[in-house]
Image (spheres, helix red, strand yellow):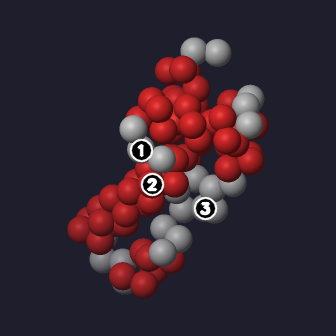
Amino acid sequence: MDCNIILNNVIEYIEKNLTNKIDYDELSKTVGMSGVTLQKIFCFLTNTSLSEYIRKRRLSMAAEDLILTNGKIIDIAIKYQY
């Protein structure tokens, strides 16, 4: 499988599940490889770990919600798993 397709599938899964618990086992099954292999490939392609990417995406989405909505900080924090 092409690395770009793998990366796109992983990012698509993450984006759809930013407000949910992201299960690495389920994520690795969606691209057809082990969790360890997936994390190594993701890190190689993006120069960032999978967990760090998810954390940064959640943080940026939380910041966007804080700016664009009138939501309470605690509600937004809970929504993005903080």
The dot on residue 20 is 3
Element type at marker 3?
loop
Give the residue type that dot 3 points to.
Asn
Marks 2/3: CA–CA distance: 16 Å
Give the residue type that dot 2 points to.
Glu
Q: How many marks?
A: 3
At 45% across and 30% down in the image, what residue appears?
45
Q: Which residue lies most toward the top here?
A: 2
Say left or right for 46 vs 42: left
Q: Work out whether mark 1 precedes mark 3 in sequence or the reverse, and give the earlier one.
A: 3
The dot on residue 40 is none
At 29% across and 71% down in the image, what residue appears?
66
Label pair 2/1, CB-CB below 8 angstroms: yes
Q: Position of residue 34 (x, y in %)?
A: 74, 37
Of 37 and 29, which appears nearest the observer?
A: 37
Q: Position of residue 21 (x, y in %)?
A: 63, 62
Element type at marker 2?
helix
Q: Position of residue 31 (x, y in %)?
A: 68, 30
Quadrant that contains the N terminus: top right
Please tell me how crowded label 1 is: few (under 14), some (14-19), or many (20+) other residues with Cα within 10 Å: few
Q: Compared with residue 82, is residue 9 higher up or lower down, i.e. above or below?
A: above
Q: Quadrant of residue 40?
A: top right
Of 81 and 66, which appears nearest the observer?
A: 81
Q: Which residue is mark 1?
A: 48
Q: Which residue is mark 2?
A: 52
- Disc number lying in front (1 or 3): 1
Q: Work out whether mark 2 precedes mark 3 in sequence or the reverse, and give the earlier one.
A: 3
Give the residue type that dot 1 points to.
Thr
Q: Is residue 10 visible?
A: no
Q: Quadrant of residue 64?
A: bottom left
At 54% across and 20% down in the image, what residue appears?
3
